[in-house]
Image (spheres, helix red, strand yellow):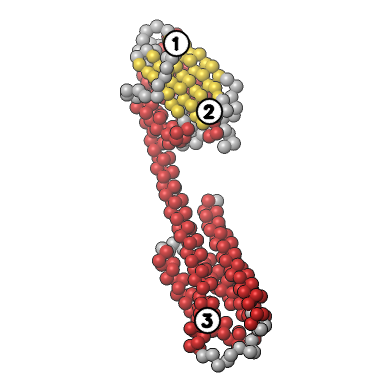
Amino acid sequence: MTTSLWSTQPQHRFWYFHLLYWLLYLLLKYTHVAILVPLQGDDAWPFIVSYTVITTLGLLITGWLGHRDLMASYSLAQQLKRLLYWLIPLFFALLVLRQRLLEFYALELDKSMSWFDILIGTPQLVFLPLAGWTAVFMLIKANQLYQREFIAQQALLNQARAARLKVLRYQLNPHFMFNTLNALNSLIVSRQGLQAEELIQHLSTFLRHSLKNKDDNLVPLPQELDALTAYLAIQQLRFGKRLVLNWQLQTLPKLQIPPLLLQPLAENAVLYTVAEISGEVQLDISFSCDDKELKITLCRVPAITAPTTETAVWPASLSQLAERLDLMFGAKAKLQLQLSGGAFYSELCLPLESLYVDH
């Protein structure tokens, strides 16, 4: 579909300006004939016939030239050379035709005028419209070449962006897999078969979500929540009663978010809290939205009161998350973090206009 639109839109644009140019030129000549020729005591209709025939021929021949060459990959210099190859002979042919038409229809025309006088006195009447059309066509051609180059550059940038996003996704998954397999091994060694089976089921849910969404196309928010729930359930199996989860979900509209966007936050929340200190740790996970953005907060209770956007050293997974957000949403997405041993606060804000299902 994209190729079809690209091949037809420039042609439509060319024919619009092509017809507009020649019709405006013909209107200008009709106005000239209607005003000036009667003042000279001559009949207007021979000139009207002459200009109509010459303009029609110019419209048809230049239209054929433009339609033929518009989509060709010629440079501007090559394109001008190709046009001149046809337009120079056309100029002399139309010059001779104009004189013959006037000689045939305008009986009072001075037949003693030599061809040298014709070439000196009247060429601008044929040259100017052809030169004007050439200028218009070259402008259209230059714009078309610029758009083609711009679209090609955008395609390359999009491919590079998609490749970079995939690399970031693949860098996130091994951290989770390594920790989960270690937890599974511990459960098997300690002969906790029921918990090991439950962990495998949660792992299956999470991996199914990950493999199903290989690209960074948006996925329904409930689907991403299911994956996050499975991930945190695995962590609860690892740490038992020491990890308490407090979900706070407002009524949300139908939204889509990038897949596995929340897993790095959950992974580091566990890493900087329950994995660092002994005793019970409560993590709050809240989702809310206003008219402009979706806010996702994941923090330890009691929460840190003054989150900052700068940290001395961010973990690799969170740096990669920040890069993903920048690639996908630019400055419209915000990530606030504060973390240390035993403390964690994260707040992720995504632009609501980019998350609607019908977007």
- The percent coordinates of residue 187 (x first, y second) are 40, 14
What amino acid is labelled 3 in the image? Answer: Thr
- Displayed quadrant of residue 340: top left
Q: Residue at x 63, y 77 (%)?
A: 36
Circles 3 and 1, Cβ within 8 Å, touching? The answer is no
Amino acid at the residue labelled 1: Pro
The amino acid type of the residue labelled 2 equals: Glu
Would you call the spot at circle 1 few (<14 residues within 10 Å), some (14-19), or many (20 or more)? few
Image quarter where the C terminus lies is top right
Answer few, some or many: residues within 10 Å of disc 2's Cα (few below 14, many 20 plus, some between 14 and 19): some
Work out how far the residue at label 2 is from the one at label 3, CA to CA, in angstroms. Answer: 69 Å
Can residue 274 be seen here? The reply is: yes
Q: Which mark is residue 154?
A: none
> Which residue is denoted by mark 2 in the rendering?
293
Residue 220 visible in rendering: no
Q: Quadrant of residue 168?
A: top left
- The numbered disc on residue 122 is 3
Q: Nearer the viewer, residue 192 or 70?
A: 70
Q: Mark 1 or 2 closer to N-term?
A: 2
Residue at 54% x, 16% y: name it: 248
Q: Earlier in the sequence, mark 2 or mark 3?
A: 3
Task: Count the labels in the image.
Answer: 3
Q: Residue furthest bottom?
A: 112
- Residue 37 horizontal/vertical position (percent): 64, 79
